[in-house]
Amino acid sequence: MNAPSTPALAAPFTLGGHTLRNRLVATAHATAAVADGAPTEADHAYWRRLAQGGAGMVITGGTAVSPESTLPRRYLTEAWRPEIKDAVRRRAEAITEGGAVAIAQLVHLGRETLGAGTYYPPVSAAAVRSPREASAPHPLSAEEVRRVVDAFRVSAANSVQAGFDGIELHAGHGYLLAQFLSRATNTRDDEFGDRITLLAQVIDAIRTEIGQHPIGVRVSVEPGANSGLGLDDLVELLPRLHAAAPFTYVNVTTGVRNTYVPGMATTRPPLLASVARLRDATGLPLLVSQGFRSAGDIERALDSGADLVGMARPFIADPDFARKAVAGDERSIRPCTSCNEGCRTFEPTGSCSVNPELGPPGAAARPAVPLLLSHSGTGGDGPVAVVGAGPAGMECAAALARTGHEVVVFDGAPHVGGQTRLAGRAAHRSGWLKLIDYQRDQLADLGVELRLGTAPASAELSEYAQVVLATGAQEAAVSVPGSLPTFRSTDFLDRCADLVPSAPRVVVLDDGFGWWQGISTVESALAAGAREVTLVTPGNGFATGISAENRTQLTNRLGGAPLRVIALTTVTATTDGGLRLRGVLDGRETDLAADALVTVGERLPHSPDFTPVHGQTVRAIGDCVVPRLVAHAVAEGRVAAEAVTDRAP
């Protein structure tokens, strides 16, 4: 029998005199564990853990080169300041001691303020307004541009002197260097009107400071026919840039602010089909990034000509991603769902919905407290019963099994996943199914017994000294009088493919919070072929409860859809052919034709009919305590397992 071949992703690679142990790169990201512009001990711990997980190269992001490119909360690293070198040195050491090559990415935001109320005016190549900003930026004078070049030079020198192996220049995602590269934003008629001039001068200035240390350039394919920096532009600019100012590698990604961190609707790497063309355009080491989640797609990119493949969020979800992928143990990788929730909030620092081990500064993990319903005082031995096979229950059961406990998981449904499984079946939300599949596979691999399809009786649970309730939530019905067919959103999502053909005009009555229940109902109705969808909400708009990134991508993909949004309005009654609307401000009533009404109701804890017996310790976790997010369910599941193991009250 032939031994299995070593995957291409596991092969070492030499880059600028440094040997990467494999082809997997943790591309630039940050956790915002930065105080007054300097990395904290929590920041160092994060990078140390990531590097120990096996990535060949780690690129740190969120590193600004000048004061006018910082944010008021100062959670970007301020690389131009020599007084923070010791903190930056500890960051670099955390990476290199973990066995990875350490690269510091430097950025100037230019006209993009990230939505923050900055202290300084936004700047750019020209006074061309960003579609994400209220005002046009200040156009930099030639002298001001030269000061930008010097800012990059100083910041690069400080970073390498602090121990970083090299520098990456962020010339993508619509930030300042990209603004000079773009036809749409660089309308200058001076020397910097040549789109490569600024970047070439930055590279030359940095090279005089850091010698032969690697210099990488990150660029992005910007969406839209009129973006000014599409794939054709990059294919033309990159060889010309390298001829003018040689650099070590190119990192190609896609998107601009609010699109460069794709949500669940992006299910395959956007650049996979373009790797061969990029390979033909440049002889430089080629790093391709964005949307890579599986070893299969990584191997396809390498086979197509990429030298390295980069990811960020998958390493946040599982810092051991590289080690597991190299070992061929993809099944055990905790998957990034692309939900863009915890990792994009930075409150107080970036976190992760599926990774309970990633906590805020001062915490060893995500804080969580299961609800203790009864305590025996001794904890008791023997098998543990977990009631509920959603994210909370499965996380708890797997964590218990890893510590040697015998666990039995009960669920009245015929399948695992709970409400998260239903959420994952909605249009463009399949990322949640990755988590459910991972947890189910972990239970199978750990030998956890699953009893599905029947709810356990109290007598059956009385045999267990330790019980964890993870029975989730259920949606309340919204009372709307009348005769029009009316469905709860959960019922509609479960049956929309069957309902929409006979009810092509769908009205969704949102609860006003603008969260995914209403959004998924709208998208699923459209995906099922609805001729017309109307979202009615007492709130002030559509999708107001989700992140700006998710909202931008949502509205982009809904462009041209037969969707109407009626805000500050509610539904008071229905008839055979429609419903009655009332404005929440003026009370004005109008009629709207419809074939079906879908209501988004409050999510209420689902408490089982169960009374603890004497000597039994019972805890409740997740939505059956208070309905919240997957992040809370996963964290409470993990902490409940620790409490059972420690026999803690």
Image (spheres, rainbow, N blue to C red):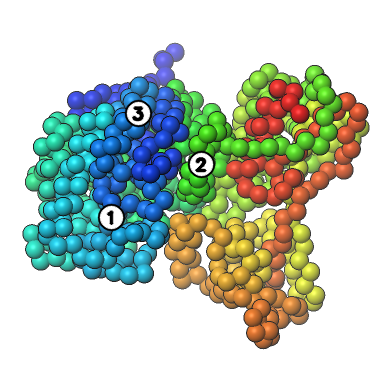
What residue does disc 3 label?
90
Which mark, residue 68?
Answer: 1
For image coordinates 59% across by 76% down, the residue present is 566
Residue 286, picture quadrant: top left
* Nearest the eye: 223 or 88: 88
Give the mark count.
Answer: 3
Q: Is residue 178 above or below residue 564?
A: above
Q: CA distance from mark 1 to mark 3?
A: 26 Å
Position of residue 143 measured from the top left corner of the image (x, y, whole percent):
12, 58
Position of residue 43 measured from the top left corner of the image (x, y, whole percent):
42, 35
Disc 1 is placed on an element classified as helix
State left or right for residue 151 relative to residue 52: left
Amino acid found under the numbered disc labelled 1: Glu
**Mark closer to the chain start, 1 or 3:** 1
For image coordinates 16% across by 52% down, the residue present is 147
**Mark closer to the chain start, 1 or 2:** 1
Residue 279 visible within the image: no
The residue carrying pointer 2 sits among few (fewer than 14), some (14 to 19) or many (20 or more) residues within 10 Å by Cα, namely many
For image coordinates 11% across by 42% down, the residue present is 204
Amino acid found under the numbered disc labelled 3: Arg
Q: Is residue 207 above or below residue 398?
A: below
